[in-house]
């Protein structure tokens, strides 16, 4: 009898954990949808991520009028003037097993844009800790600027 009770408790815990995980995944997906709709992620960045980016930008803009051209909308695959972006309607977003959120779409049916978002959630509020693109990330690029005082190559 005790075995059945323990098994039932374990099953209930597993179901609750899976449900909470799905809820968290849904929250992460909603955040990434907002990011693409608004064409920017720094509004949703964690305090530490914002601090690194601000510090890197301050250094980058000292020497370069375009500040290394690390604009958040570029990293999302947008160029200048893309206020109406029809291809984002075909945006595919999924949460990977490692917790990263993957988003991709095709620009004008040709060039594929892929981004991975490192998102942390606490108390129902999710924030962006990094945006990965290609072999680099927004955080790594700004950390490079802070460390070496120049734009990443």
Image (cartoon, grey):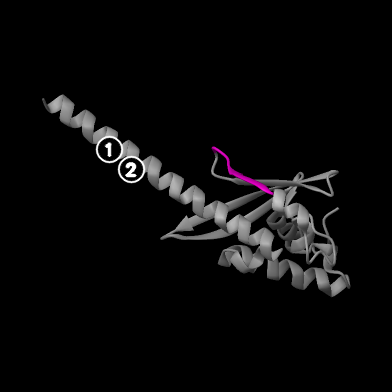
**Residue at the farthest left position:** 1
Q: Is residue 94 magenta?
A: yes
Marks 1 and 2: in contact by CB < 8 Å?
A: yes
Q: Is residue 16 above or below residue 58?
A: above
Give neighbour class at mark 2: few <14, some 14-19, many 20+ (Cα, 10 Å): few
x then y, percent, for residue 81: 84, 67
| Residue 65: numbered disc | none
x then y, percent, for residue 116: 66, 47
x then y, percent, for residue 62: 83, 74
Left or right side of 63 for 115 = left
Residue positioned 70% across, 69% down in the render: 55
Residue positioned 56% across, 56% down in the render: 30
Which residue, given by chain and number where applicable, does mark 1 sit on? Answer: 12
x then y, percent, for residue 50: 63, 67
Query: Which sits in the foreground, 49 or 40?
Result: 40
Query: Which sits in the foreground, 86 or 101?
Result: 86
Q: CA distance from mark 2 to mark 1?
A: 6 Å
Q: Is residue 65 above or below residue 149?
A: below
Q: Tell me the quarter of the image containing the N terminus.
A: top left
Residue positioned 59% across, 43% down in the render: 94
Q: Secondary structure at mark 2?
A: helix
Left or right side of 81 for 138 = left
Where, by quadrant of the figure, is residue 85 drawn?
A: bottom right
Query: Which sits in the foreground, 30 or 62?
Result: 30
- What range is drawn magenta here? 91-97
Which residue, given by chain and number where applicable, does mark 2 sit on? Answer: 16
Left or right side of 78 for 100 = left
């Amino acid at each position: 009898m005790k075995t059945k009770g323990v098994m039932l408790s374990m099953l209930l815990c597993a179901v609750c954990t899976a449900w909470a995980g799905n809820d968290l995944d849904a929250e992460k997906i909603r955040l990434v949808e907002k990011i693409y709709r608004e064409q920017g992620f720094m509004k949703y960045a964690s305090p530490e991520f914002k601090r690194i980016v601000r510090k890197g930008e301050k250094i980058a803009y000292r020497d370069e009028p375009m500040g290394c051209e690390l604009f958040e909308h570029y990293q999302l695959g947008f160029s200048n003037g893309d206020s109406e972006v029809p291809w984002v309607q075909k945006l595919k977003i999924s949460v990977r097993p490692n917790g990263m959120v993957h988003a991709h779409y095709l620009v004008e049916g040709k060039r594929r844009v892929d981004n991975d978002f490192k998102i942390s959630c606490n108390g129902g509020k999710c924030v962006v800790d990094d945006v990965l693109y290609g072999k680099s990330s927004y955080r790594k690029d700004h950390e490079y600027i802070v460390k070496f005082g120049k734009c990443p190559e």
